[in-house]
Image (cartoon, rainbow, N blue to C red):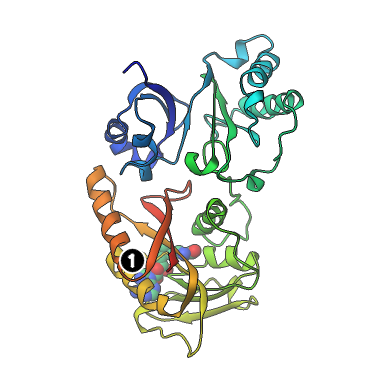
């Protein structure tokens, strides 16, 4: 730890357990302690190593910690009142655009800290004057928000823009309910979360936008796109879930992606690929079909990597795919590991 090192909270998804130590080391950070489910409180000398280094893609979310109160809130008298007063005193004059409080252990069946997060936010909002934003998705992604995380280890807070933190919610996860019997597949949550994530970079897709979706079946992602008023040409060599076949807005093509030729004159607004073949082949299909993508059109690409066993192995695949896409005029503007991703990253490109 150096004299000017700062505490930083980084969230590393559980699927990267095998490389967590290596990722932390490459941020230049020294581990102080592990918190909650996936959080690590580290001391870093150089913020850029956290936010711009090659390991950034392994960090689901990050926050410089400017105020912490390590304690068990359950055992602390008047925790909410004292914490809210301190937040207002420490951060009020810095005028954050918003205040959001999440849990260090959101998956826990213990609802206690969920209540603490919500009651603390409620009380703190009474003390802060005129925060301009109250809805998560209404945040200006480039302006500072006061984010806090709370759990049995205490309260950890700091100000940072959502884009620098890599997410609009504290912790970076948007909860997507998959319990409905209408849920077609787990993949639906990935596109739902991806569309939320890119609000930090682009306006939402206009109603009626036309997507070409590669590797669409059984159709969880298609269902989410249709729900949002999008039109979808869905291609797969496996069948689409029956519930989607007659839905308005979807055209299903049962075929090998390589054989699909867009009808003459078709211009898509977006390409979505969740193909489960080798990534080099999948990006090849995306590039071929991007000839029919409008300028500025969006590509959402799930990059599936083998079980991540070292940082360099995954980074090499990542860099090769990005370089191939960029050579073909698709510019990477964001990448992340979504909460609902397994051994995969989600990459976002725009057609130059
Ligand atoms: C991970 S699954 C996609 C899940 C889907 N996105 C959803 O929302 O339910 C991958 C799909 O890619 C399809 N696939 C892989 N390679 C393909 C190819 N060359 N041509 C057509 N479909 C392909 C598989 O049949 C499989 O349905």
Q: Quadrant of the C terminus?
A: bottom left
What residue lies at 64% left-to-right and 16% top-to-bottom?
86
Location of residue 241 with respect to 291 vertically, above or below: above
Residue at the bottom extreme of this rendering: 264
What residue lies at 48% left-to-right and 73% top-to-bottom?
295
Residue 42 place in picture, x, y as percent: 38, 24
Q: Quadrant of residue 72?
A: top right
Residue 316 place in picture, x, y as percent: 24, 53
Instruction: Give left or right: position of 103 versus 216.
Output: right
Residue at the top extreme of this rendering: 77
Can residue 327 be spotted in the picture? yes
Q: Nearer the viewer, residue 114 or 59?
A: 59
Q: Nearer the viewer, residue 335 or 252?
A: 335
Location of residue 288 with respect to 127 vertically, above or below: below
Instruction: Give left or right: position of 100 versus 69.
Output: right
What residue lies at 62% left-to-right and 76% top-to-bottom?
249
Mark 1 close to ligand 1, CB under 8 Å: no
Can residue 309 be spotted in the picture? no
Residue 299 place in picture, x, y as percent: 45, 66
Q: How many marks?
A: 1
* SS for callout 1: helix
At label 1, counting other C-alpha atoms closer than 10 Å, the crowd grade (few under 14, some 14-19, many 20 or more) is many
View quadrant of ligand 1: bottom left
Q: Quadrant of residue 319?
A: bottom left
Q: Quadrant of the N terminus?
A: top left
Instruction: Give left or right: position of 286 versus 120.
Output: left
Location of residue 269 with respect to 97 vertically, above or below: below
Q: Which residue is mark 1?
A: 325
Residue 186 place in picture, x, y as percent: 50, 56
What residue lies at 34% left-to-right and 68% top-to-bottom?
283
């Amino acid at each position: 730890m150096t004299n000017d090192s700062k505490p930083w909270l980084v969230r590393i998804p559980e699927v990267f357990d095998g490389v967590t130590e290596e990722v932390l080391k490459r941020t230049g950070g020294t581990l102080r302690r592990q918190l909650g489910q996936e959080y690590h409180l580290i001391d870093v000398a150089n913020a850029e190593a956290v936010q711009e280094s090659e390991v950034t893609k392994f960090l689901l979310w990050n926050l410089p910690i400017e105020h912490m109160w390590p304690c068990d809130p359950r055992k602390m008298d008047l925790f909410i009142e004292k914490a809210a007063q301190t937040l207002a005193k420490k951060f009020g004059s810095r005028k954050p655009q918003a205040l959001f409080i999440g849990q260090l252990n959101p998956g826990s069946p213990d609802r206690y800290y969920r209540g603490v997060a919500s009651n603390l936010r409620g009380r703190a909002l009474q003390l802060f004057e005129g925060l301009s934003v109250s809805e998560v998705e209404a945040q200006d992604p480039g302006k500072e928000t006061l984010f806090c995380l709370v759990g049995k280890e205490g309260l950890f807070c700091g100000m940072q823009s959502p884009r620098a933190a890599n997410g609009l919610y504290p912790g970076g996860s948007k909860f997507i309910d998959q319990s409905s019997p209408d849920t077609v597949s787990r993949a639906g949550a990935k596109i739902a979360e991806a569309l939320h994530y890119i609000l930090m970079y682009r306006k939402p897709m206009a109603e009626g936008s036309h997507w070409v979706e590669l590797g669409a079946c059984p159709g969880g992602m298609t269902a989410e796109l249709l729900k949002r008023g999008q039109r979808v040409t869905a291609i797969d060599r496996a069948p689409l879930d029956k519930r989607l076949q007659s839905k308005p807005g979807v055209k299903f093509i049962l075929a090998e992606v390589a054989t699909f030729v867009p009808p003459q004159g078709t211009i898509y607004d977006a390409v979505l690929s969740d193909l489960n073949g080798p990534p080099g082949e999948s990006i090849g299909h995306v590039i071929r079909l991007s000839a029919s993508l409008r300028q500025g059109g969006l590509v959402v690409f799930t990059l599936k990597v083998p079980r991540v066993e070292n940082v360099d192995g995954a980074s090499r695949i990542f860099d090769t795919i990005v370089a191939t896409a960029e050579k073909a005029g698709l510019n990477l503007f964001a990448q992340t590991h979504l909460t609902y991703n397994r051994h995969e990253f989600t990459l976002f490109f725009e057609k130059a």
